[in-house]
Image: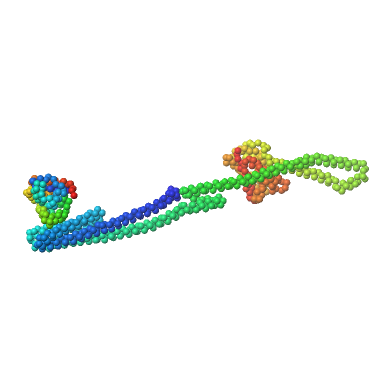
Amino acid sequence: MAFAQIAIIAHKAVPEDTLSQALLLDFYSGEIKSWSNKVPVVVFDLKPVGETRELFYKLLGKTSSRMKSIWLKKLLMGEGEPPAALESEEEVVKKVAATRGAIGYVGKVKVTGEVKIITVVAKKEK
Amino acid sequence: MKFKDFKLGAKLAIGFGFILVIMAGGNIFSIRRMTAIKNEINEITANRLPRTLAIADLNLNIAALRISQLQHAFTTDPVAGKRQRDMMSKLIDRIEKNKDTYERLKNESETRKFYSDEEKELYAAFDRRWEMYQDLSFAFFKLLDDHQAQKAIALLNGEAQEVFGAFSAEVTALANVNKKDSAKAVRRAETEYRAARAITQTLLIITIVISAFLVAGLARFIAVPVRQLVHAAQSVAGGDLQVHLKIDSKDEIGNLAHSFNLMTASLREARERMQKTQVQLVQSEKMASLGQLTAGIAHEINNPVNFVSANVGPLRRDIAEVFAVLAQYDDTVATQQLQEKFKNVETLKKTLDWPYLKDEINNLLDGVQEGAHRTSEIVKGLRSFTRLDEDERKPADINQGLESALLMLKHQLKNRVEVIKDFGNVPPVVCYPGKLNQVFLNLLANASQAITGAGKIFIRTVCDGEIVTIAIKDTGTGMTPEVRKHIFEPFFTTKPIGEGTGLGLPITYGIIEAHDGNIEVYSEPGQGSEFVITLPVK
């Protein structure tokens, strides 16, 4: 499974340890705006460099243009901005570690002890 | 095993099966071709056309989105702005729906292998271009939010314009690819249709030709022999038993023909046997009545002939005594001078030619005696012809019997007739040996008499286990059919009167019949005659 190569990471204080695929999509499309402890969700995306971003979108079950349509609509409805797209995976790790309620994705090899890993349950929910 | 040796059912099944296989094969082939055509047409109407429409609609919606964005950049009224943003959101929804429709159709088409790599690449390029436009849109809205409307408009008219132009071209290319592929599909469908039509027509012709051959074959294998059978049956009904069918197939008709041939053969045999029996029956009936007649005649003649035979001797003696008395008279007249008185007697004697008279009386008596003798010989013959119960049956050697008959005729044959014997290994035959010897003697004597001057007699004996065949053949004068017809009738003879009694062959016939045998004659004038006797061994 290509998904085994990527890891979903979050800020240490985030209470959740697992997320379903559908919930992960809801976080990224801006449907869910806060964690269970009311801390607002801060989503990080990657610029289209390397294959990590591509693998992540496959995990979400959306193409990047589909995700962008969702964000564009949210923006037009005044329901939120698209997530910030960072230059590198190292930066993602750094930002997630430093931001309360942050969530992002990186290659498994890039994960450090500064962040917590969230397991994605590959349960389909439609 | 040849085709003609199969049963009728098998022949029919093979013929019709062959046609059926060809027709089924042709149909399956045509149906497959037609299915291919149907699939092509289905693909065009149900997938390619809606797919192209979705892409065209997508292009229109993106164009509308760009126009809305431009309008929005110039709008300052927040209410109008809000309405425009709603409008743009709806356009994005429509674009997503267009993409949904297209991708669904694309997946369907891909599973059916109708989706081309060229279109796949074009669509991927288009999607990347669309993503670029989305990125520019984010930048555009950010500029508007930062109240930099002029820069936002510049972005839309600059970079975004270029991107839009590029993907417009890509959408057009996509539509063109579909148009081209549709045209190709139509051409393919046309080719398939022509192939199917050609195959169907060819098969139709082949089927017709094979059917024609099959019908001709059936006619040959069934109708023709049946017609022969019908003709043959009609011939048999008309009495012609010489019919023979030449049908050598091993099917039911062949069996029928074979049985028919056996039937006519046995009918033929039965009829021949019947005719033969009839001839024999008529012959023996004739002989029986002739036998009765001759027995009666023999009996009736016997008595008067006995008078003559019995009376001639005493009469001769009596006349001799009368002559002696008369001689005494003559002596007396000469010595006692009664000449004058007897002068008249002497004159009478002279007138009557007395010595001649005496001779004549003796001659007449001789004649009467000879006649009586011959008549009694005939009566003896007639008796022999009617009665065969004189001696006993016992086994006898046929070849030996022939040899003894030849011995009796030795002086007749000597230096004149050559006898050629071909005696087979013949077992003793239970018979009346004396009677059979009489038969052989009769036949050999006849053969010898038939030969004027020098000639040959062939004697042949054969035994096939139960039947002994004795054939006596001469190189004599032969017989006309008319003569041949009557030879077994009593008193029929071709010999001068007084030489043949006309009883030899009727007696022979009676003897052979008494032995349960058969006698046949083969003869032509100038070709000699052959008598063939068949006798059962027991």
Q: Residue furthest left?
A: A98
Q: Is residue B357 above or below residue B90?
A: above
Residue A19 seen in render: yes
Expressed as whole percent of the image width and height from the top left, the position of residue B527 reads 63, 50
Residue B411 seen in render: no
Residue B262 or B35: which is nearer the viewer?
A: B35
Q: Is residue B445 above or below residue B142?
A: above
Expressed as whole percent of the image width and height from the top left, the position of residue B447 reads 66, 46
Residue B283 or B235: which is nearer the viewer?
A: B235
Asked where in the image residue A16 lies, by quadrant, the reply is top left
Expressed as whole percent of the image width and height from the top left, the position of residue A79 reads 11, 54
Image-based side of A121 in relation to B491, left or right: left
In the image, what residue occupies the spot 9% across and 48% down?
Answer: A38
Image-based side of B478 in relation to B332, left or right: left
Residue B483 or B347: which is nearer the viewer?
A: B483
Expressed as whole percent of the image width and height from the top left, the position of residue B535 reads 61, 41
Image-based side of B135 in relation to B461, left or right: left
Residue B392 or B329: which is nearer the viewer?
A: B392
Q: Residue furthest front?
A: B79
